[in-house]
Image (cartoon, helix red, strand yellow):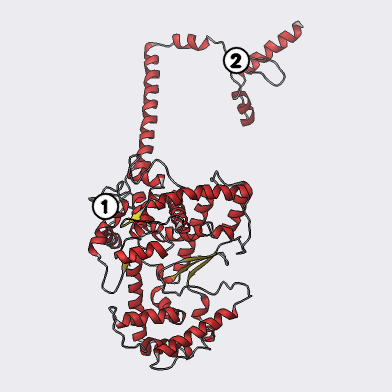
Amino acid sequence: MEALRESVLHLALQMSTYKRATLDEEDLVDSLSEGEVYPNGLQVNFRSPRSGQRCWAARTQVEKRLVVLVVLLAAGLVACLAALGIQYRTRTPAVCLSEACVSVTSSILSSMDPTVDPCQDFFTYACGGWIKANPVPDGHSRWGTFSNLWEHNQAIIKHLLGKQPAGRPLSGPRRRAASRTHLARPGKRTCLPRWKFCVSDTENNLGFALGPMFVKATFAEDSKNIASEIILEIKKAFEESLSTLKWMDEDTRRSAKEKADAIYNMIGYPNFIMDPKELDKVFNDYTAVPDLYFENAMRFFNFSWRVTADQLRKAPNRDQWSMTPPMVNAYYSPTKNEIVFPAGILQAPFYTRSSPKALNFGGIGVVVGHELTHAFDDQGREYDKDGNLRPWWKNSSVEAFKQQTECMVEQYGNYSVNGEPVNGRHTLGENIADNGGLKAAYRAYQNWVKKNGAEQTLPTLGLTNNQLFFLGFAQVWCSVRTPESSHEGLITDPHSPSRFRVIGSVSNSREFSEHFHCPPGSPMNPQHKCEVW
């Protein structure tokens, strides 16, 4: 026993003075604090508890002061580094003074009414200036951002049709159809200029024949890739939100993610229209005649019905679009599980390559999110990832979904126009898509900032880029309507009035209230918020 005690004491003495050479051994010994146990069960102390006190007492006054000074300097250095880090993270981004930034700032300012408190009425704050400057034009019952862009596209089509003899002609039946339908218009008196009716009617019937000209004139080829990237960002953001839902069971959530992944993107135009031979095949059975507008219209209706009847009992064809390239709109098809964005909407104010990302995500980003969310609204959710109408949700999630949506039915049902209430149930699908689209686009923008860093701000606005995101979203919906048109819309339109598409969505957004510092209980920051997706 005495020999063992001497061996242990000798070992302790050696270990307290041994200079370790390898990293692994150094990690092992350094990981042991005073009084810890080695694997062999022997407890070893390397220093006395009072050794530190004796060491400090043995120091001279100068040494003690130097130690204290070093500690204070080290603490000061850490504090300075922390302050610099905070300043770096919260510093105001540089201001963009390029021609494009100044131009878009001017447009934003002219549409705003900065005298309005955004927490009281965000729609009027965002669109008050636009509404004052844009009364309903003669010949129209409503006017808005969509209308303005569509008129811009009409002017382009008019110009293209007017220069047809000098440009690359339409071939075969497409040229005869487009030109004769365009020119053959009876002399009925109308408030609209004749050319607008003719162009609109031609585009409605023969938009795919006009598509190649419009696409070549307005749509940069790499716009497809840029739009595809935005769509991928929105999908990713939507799926991130999907993973956080508390009301959905795991099996249904997994199937919902599979459906989101399977959504097919159609951007700009269908590929077949850029091939003259393929396009001529489409219109080969349609022939227009000179100077007979009514007969041409009847011939086209018959042609359309033959094409539609030929599709019966056939698998859906993803190359067939329900909107022509110049259209200022977008849609989701539940039977094809696809989202479609014609070239006509991939323009300002929805998207421009020179605009801040905050505006692009608030514009076309929200449109993408809106159409994506339609795959999971009160009707779209009933179709699976292959477009089949079948029950793929568990009953528990179906009931939870209905409970979540009742909140929106009640919320929008409390809005009214000229004393007439909005039908919250009739507009439910679009309201779900509006709210889900805004949420997905905002998350996608935040993901972009994390990846690429904060972008420059616009001058004179005094807004952060997060605030600019919501402002860009709201200004897309600036519009005016006659009382009669408003009444008709409340009865027939599945969309809520533009004003409520804005304030209904932002009042459900906690992020909006945070960025605009809206007090709890204010109109744009109600205590109770609705959320489905």
Q: Amino acid at mark 1?
A: Leu
Q: Residue 41 shows which numbered tag?
A: none
Q: Residue 46 shows which numbered tag?
A: 2
Left or right: residue 105 compared with residue 388: left
Q: Quadrant of residue 437?
A: bottom left
Task: Measuring from the top left, give residue 42's x and y in whole percent.
Answer: 69, 15
Instruction: Identify the mark nearer the N-term, 2 or 1.
Output: 2
Task: Measuring from the top left, give residue 203's x and y in whole percent.
Answer: 41, 79
Q: CA distance from mark 2 to mark 1?
A: 66 Å
Residue at position x 39%, y 14% from top? 64
Residue sitting nearer the eye, 524 or 360: 524
Does residue 192 lie above or below 474 as drawn? below
Q: Quadrant of residue 262?
A: bottom right
Q: Residue furthest top?
A: 2
> For mark 1, what is the residue?
461
Residue at position x 34%, y 50% from top? 467
